[in-house]
Image: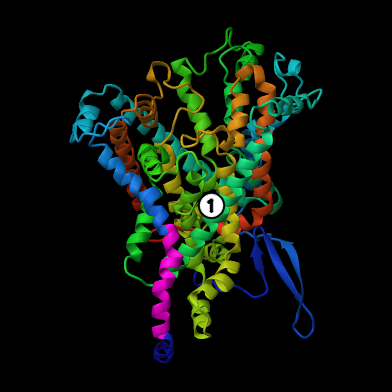
Amino acid sequence: MKMNKVKSPKQETVGIFRKRPKYDEEGRLIYYKKKKLIKSRVNRSVGGDAVMLFFLLLCGAFMAFPMVYAISNSFKPLHELWLFPPNLIVKNPTLSNYKDMFTILSNTTIPFTRYLFNTLFITITCTFLRIVSASMAAYPLSKWKFKGKKAVNKLITTSLMISAPAATYASYIIYSTLGLVDSWLVYLIPALGSSFSLYLIRGFVDQFPDSVLEAARIDGAGDFRIFWSILMPNMKPAWMTLIVFSVRDYWNTGANIYIYREELKTLNYALGQITAEGMARAGVSNAVEVLMMIVPILTFLITQSNIIETMATSGMKD
Amino acid sequence: MKKVTKSASLRRVERERKLGLTLFLGPFLVTFFIFTVLPVFVSVLLSLTDFNLLEFPNFVGLENYSRLFLNDTLFPKAVQNTLILAMITGPGGYILCFAFAWLINEIPPKPRAFLTLLFFAPSLSGGLGVVWSLLFSNDKYGYINAWLLEFGIIKEPILWTVNTDYMWPVCIIILLWSSIGTSFLTFIAGLQTVDKSLYEAGAVDGIKNRWQELYFITLPQMRGQLLFGAVLSITGAFSVGAAIFPSPTQDYTLYTLSMHLADYGGARYEMGYASAIAMVMFIMTYVANQVIRFIIGKLGK
């Protein structure tokens, strides 16, 4: 059904917005106007809509509660944290928890900036590797004809069903046999073979019209040119989505059974050491939570409209 | 027309294809095989040995499996707990994801964008579980205990993470809360790509309310996203761990297969035995996935 849908040239949906182009008298495009997408829905009652909105806000409050709570707690002075009964919203906001956090972090044997650098390096490099490798593999796996293509695609679908802990010990043997243990290679190399990433991008490539690729080939473009100049720019929303999931995963990378050297460990690991003190560090641990949230949430906000568009096309097809 | 272009460029294309296939697919396929497929085969082999990380493994045949199924008193309990948790949090989380995505899609765009962020935010941050352990802390300074004491509902603090009466509900609430994430966002997106004209056509054809619309139009249109979400939910549900509870849990309540696996693999170094547990987990996940795929394939047909 989606394949047959003919896109009207006048409107283009971007996330939850609808782009509306304006033309001058001669039919040239002057500018795009972003217009909110308001659906004229059939089969809806006003009362039902109101009840739903109320219900959703209630559930949304529950979902977001721990987050709001962590933010609020991170600004609470120590005596307010143990108020009885506890306050949900902070009364006398203070930055002391954040100051404490940085004091603790500045007294670690390995400088705090080293952990930060480690996490940034792993997050950026691995995200980049995932995108490049998955996009390149998705092109032939979706658009080319070759022997064994069906089997490989089936294998990738099945591999999504293996839960990570189920193969931990076997993985460890493979990593140590290959000599990857205790180096960042344990993050970097497997990032090339992420089946989740491939699956996401392949769903998007599947939707890309064959006719465009054929036309390019007839014009004499080679596979690399087609991939780089046609496919990649058009898959921008796909890799934007992957950025969000990937940044979320790698940014939160904590203690790892493959990494022993302290100077190779991540920010989340270092911060975990602080929160491990439990009740005594409750205020600081909330500050830690907030600090760790910032990057993934910013990534989400920046790419939000792109995500929503991309996720729609990553359906499962065998 | 096709034949003309073929004869002109086919040979070049064919030559380029072989090289291209290696270059495009190579990096992914090699690493995918080494780090995703190979571990599964190694796990199968390990499960037939007595590997303990220190000594060279001896082949013991199906001994690990017979010990697991016949002599391990905790195994049936772990399987039972895993199945119950998976059956609650898997479909529960999945249905919640879909229900919220669908409801959010029903409301106007501005609150929709805001609510999407509210619902997706928990899965963006890795360690919000800390807040749960503060809420369900066992002493009277745990927030829930404090509130209940304040309102006079209880007289002494409830031991949320130790008292076996409360562990299940607490665990399920936390797991459901944390299950709303990738699948939810997938569904949000899927709902937005359903061809809007179908709804109007449906109204003409006699669809009367939003429930009929959901069943006859929306669900069949979203089969791809539904399957994708199902794989994620099931895999997550079967590998469920202990949430905020100290492992091993009190009286082995909530003791799951992944905790059993971590115990034998991480604490006792009985890698062969742990691999046998891992195989059981994989097979359970795979079977559940096939069943769900079959059901979703039938939707709206």
User: Residue at the spot x=18%, y=36% of the render?
Assistant: B61
Q: Nearer the viewer, residue B201 or A125?
A: A125
- What is the quadrant of the C terminus of chain B in the image? bottom left
Q: Is residue A292 shown above or below A246?
A: above
Q: Give the magenta-colored segment's residue range.
A: B10-28
Q: Is B11 inside the magenta-drawn segment? A: yes
- What is the quadrant of the N terminus of chain B in the image? bottom left
**Image location (x, y in percent) of residue A133:** 49, 59
Q: How is the image coloured?
A: rainbow
User: Residue at the spot x=42%, y=54% of the render?
Assistant: B31
**Image location (x, y in percent) of residue A100:** 73, 24
Q: Nearer the viewer, residue B26 or B236?
A: B26
Q: Is residue B183 shown above or below A32?
A: above
Q: Is A275 positioned to the left or the right of A130 in the image?
A: right
Q: Is residue A73 shown above or below A258?
A: above
Q: Is B63 inside the magenta-drawn segment? A: no
**Image location (x, y in percent) of residue A277:** 61, 20
Where does label 1 land, which residue?
A: B186
Q: Is B42 positioned to the left or the right of B197 in the image?
A: left
Q: Amino acid at mark 1?
A: Thr
In terms of secondary structure, where does tag 1 sit? Answer: helix
User: Residue at the spot x=33%, y=31% of the render?
Assistant: B53
Q: Is residue B159 shown above or below B201?
A: above
Find residue B152 and report its image quarter: top right
Main secondary structure along the magenta-highlighted residues:
helix
